[in-house]
Image (tube, coloured by chain):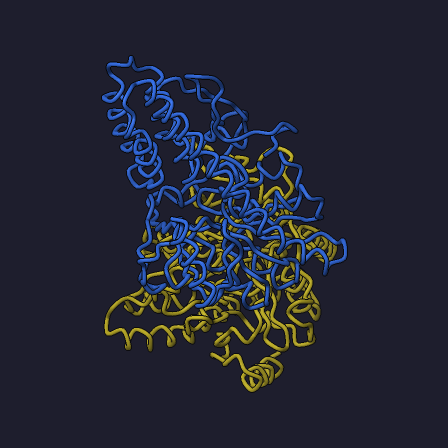
Chain colours: A blue, B yellow
Amino acid sequence: MLVNGVPYRTIWRRHEGAIAFIDQNLLPHRFAIKEATSVEEMAEAIRHMSIRGAIALGAAAAYGLELAAHRAPDTELPAALHHAATLLKQTRPTAVNIAWATDSVLEATAEATTPQELRHLLRTAVDKLVNAEIERCRRIGEHGMHIIKSLAEKKEGAPVNILTHCNAGWLGCVDYGTALAPIYVAANNGIQLHVWVSETRPRNQGSALTAWELHQHGIPYSVVTDNACGHLIQRGLVDVAFVGADRITRRGDTANKIGTYLKALACHAHGVPFYVAAPTSSFDWSSHAKPGHIPIEERSSDEVHTATGIYQGTLITVRITPEGATAWNPSFDVTPVELLSGFITEHGVFPATIEGLEELAAYAHASS
Amino acid sequence: MLVNGVPYRTIWRRHEGAIAFIDQNLLPHRFAIKEATSVEEMAEAIRHMSIRGAIALGAAAAYGLELAAHRAPDTELPAALHHAATLLKQTRPTAVNIAWATDSVLEATAEATTPQELRHLLRTAVDKLVNAEIERCRRIGEHGMHIIKSLAEKKEGAPVNILTHCNAGWLGCVDYGTALAPIYVAANNGIQLHVWVSETRPRNQGSALTAWELHQHGIPYSVVTDNACGHLIQRGLVDVAFVGADRITRRGDTANKIGTYLKALACHAHGVPFYVAAPTSSFDWSSHAKPGHIPIEERSSDEVHTATGIYQGTLITVRITPEGATAWNPSFDVTPVELLSGFITEHGVFPATIEGLEELAAYAHASS
C-alpha cells in the first residue's frame, strides 16, 4: 500500500543478502526503513516488535532463513539453517506463523542434493510463501470489496461508512491486510468511503497504526474512542463493520482484540452488518469451545495504567492511574457467531451460519 | 468520604470567610487542599476545573456568594452579591447548577430588611443547600445499598462485583456521589464488594478519579479498559452496574458519559441489572425526544488525539495519533430505557418502566 504516495510492503528483499522492513516501533510518529543482513538482525527485529502481526512475522521468518543461507559457506549450510530456524522460533514462541513459515520453507529444501540446489529451492520457497500471503490478502480484499460496492450502490454516491477495530491492516501482513484489505481494494476502485477507526485501548493500534495506514493511503477516516462506537452505530453513522480475527472456532465464534465484542453487540442491535475478515488459516476447526470458555490471554496491567505517545519529539509513556492502583488487562474477547454476518476469506465471503461454515471448512480442507 | 483514613468533603467552610476545597486538577497524582477567600478566587477555581461535577459546582457557587457577602461592607452588600452572582454564572455558562444554586440562595435573602438579617439568611440558605445535596446523595446511597445487599445475600459472602463508568463519585458532589454512593454505603455496612472501574476514555475519569476515590476509601477495585467490559460481563464477572446520568428524558432514556450505552448493551445481553443513580433533578420531564434525537455535546478532538498522565513527577499530555490525523469526539451517548433496570433516586429505587417513571414523576413534582 501507499506511504506518501509510494507503494510499500512491510518487508521485502532489497537485494541478495539484505531484507528491508518498516520499523513499526516508531510508527505513527516516524516512518523509517531498517535493514537486516543476518538472521540475528532479523530475530532482533522480531523480538523488539519492529515487525509484528501474524502474517508479517511468517514472512520475516522466511526471509530470516534466506539471510542465514546467504551468509553460510556451502559446507555449513545445513547447520546454519538449523541454527537459524531455532533462533527464529525462540523470538516469539507463541507466534505460530514463525514456526509454520520456518518449517514449510525448510521442508521445501529437503530434497536438495547439492548446496546450490538447496539455495535455489530455499529462495523459491521464500518467494512462494511471501507471494501466497500477499495473494490471500488481496483476495480477501477483492471479496470484501463487493460488500462495500453493494452498500455504495444503495447509498448512491454518498460515502460508505465502515467501522474497524485494532489494526488488521497491511502493517501486520506483507501487503493489503485482512480487515482493511476490502477498504483498500474498494478505495483503489474509486468507491467513496470513510472509515471510523476505534482507538483500541490499551495499546492504541487503531489510533496509531490504522490511522497512519489510512492517512498514508489517502483514505478518509476519523479516529474515535472505543466508547464512541455505540453512539455512532445508534445514530446510523456506520454502514458496515470489518474486523480481523485472532482465532475462530468451528462454530464461528471469533476471538479478536478486546473490544470487538462490544462493537458487534451494538451493530447487531441496530442491524448493521458485521464481518470478520481472515484467511482460513485463522480457523481452528478442532475447537468446539463455547464463547465463554475460550481461554483469553492476559497481558501486563501496565498497559492499562499507562498511555504511550509523543511529547516534544520523544516517545514516552505516562501514568494515568493513581500510584498503587489495581488493574486487569484481558487482551482478547470472543464474539459469538450469532452476532456476525459473515467471514471474508481468500475463498470468498461465507455467511456466519452452520451451512456457511460447513462450506468454508470444505474449501479449507480441500486447499490444505 | 475517606482520604488516607480521614473523612473529607470536596468543599467546606474552613472558617468564616475561608472556603476549602480539593483541587481536582492535581488528582489522582497529588492530593491538595486549596482555599478561596473571595468570590473571585472561587470563580477562578470553577473556571479552571479545580472543582467539577454538577452538585459540587452548585455548592461552590453558594459558598462563592457567602465569600462575597463576608468581604462586603454593609452598605455595598446588595451590589456585591449581584456582582458575585453574575461572575459565578459566567464561569461555566452551561452548568445549570451554578445558576440554580446562586438564584436559590439569593431568593432566600430577598425578604431581609437589614444587612445583618441578610447575612444571617444567606448563611442559613448556603448551609441548607449544601446539606440538602449531601442528604440527597446519602439517600441515593441508602436506597442503592439494598440492591447490593440482596445480591450479597445470594452470593453468600462472595464479593459483589459492581461495574461503574466515568466518575459519579463524591468528587463531583459534596459527599457520597451518585453512582458510587450505594457502593460507599454498602462498604460502610460491611458488605463484601469489588468494583470494576472502566477507564472512560478520552478523559479517563474512571482510571484517574474513580480509582483514586475507591483506593482512598479502601474499597477493592480494578481498573479495566472500556474495551474489556463486554468480556467481563460475558464471563459472569459483573453482578450489577451503576452509572450516573447527565440528563434523563420523560421516557427514561439516559444521556450519560460516552461509552455508557455499550456497557448497558452488554449487561442487557447477559441479564446483568443496570441501574442509573441520579437525583430527581437530573430528569427533564418535558423532554420527549427519542434516543437517536437527543442532542449530544461534542468536545475538542484533541482529547482523542492525546492522553494525559504523570511522567517523572510532572503531568503531561502525549500525542497518540499521527500528525494531521482526523478525530471526532462525541462526549455523551444515550442509553434507551429498555436496557435499564431502574433509577436509584433520593426518593427510592424506581423500575425503568412506564409505571415506575410515572410514580417517580409524581414524587418529583410533589417535592419540587
Q: Nearer the viewer, residue A199 or B221?
A: A199
Front in this rendered view, residue A31 or B353:
A31
In this rendering, the answer to whether B331 lies above or below B108 is above
Corner quadrant of residue A104? top left
Residue at 56%, 44% in the rendered image:
A181
What quarter of the picture does the N terminus of chain B occupy? Answer: bottom left
Does B103 sit left or right of A120 as displayed?
Answer: right
- Residue B274 in percent (x, y) is at 46, 71
The answer to whether A311 is drawn above or below residue A356 in the figure is above
Residue B181 rendering spot, x and y as whole percentages: 43, 66
- Taking the image as shown, residue B154 lies to the left or right of residue B358, namely left
Q: Quadrant of the C terminus of chain B?
A: bottom right
Q: Position of residue A214 (x, y in %)?
A: 61, 39
Q: Residue at x 49, y 55 (%)?
A: A276
Residue B148: give x, y in percent of width and height: 36, 72
Q: Quadrant of residue A155?
A: bottom right
Q: Nearer the viewer, residue B262 or B93?
A: B262
Query: What is the tally of numbered marks visible in this picture?
Result: 0
Nearer to us in this view, B351 or B290: B290
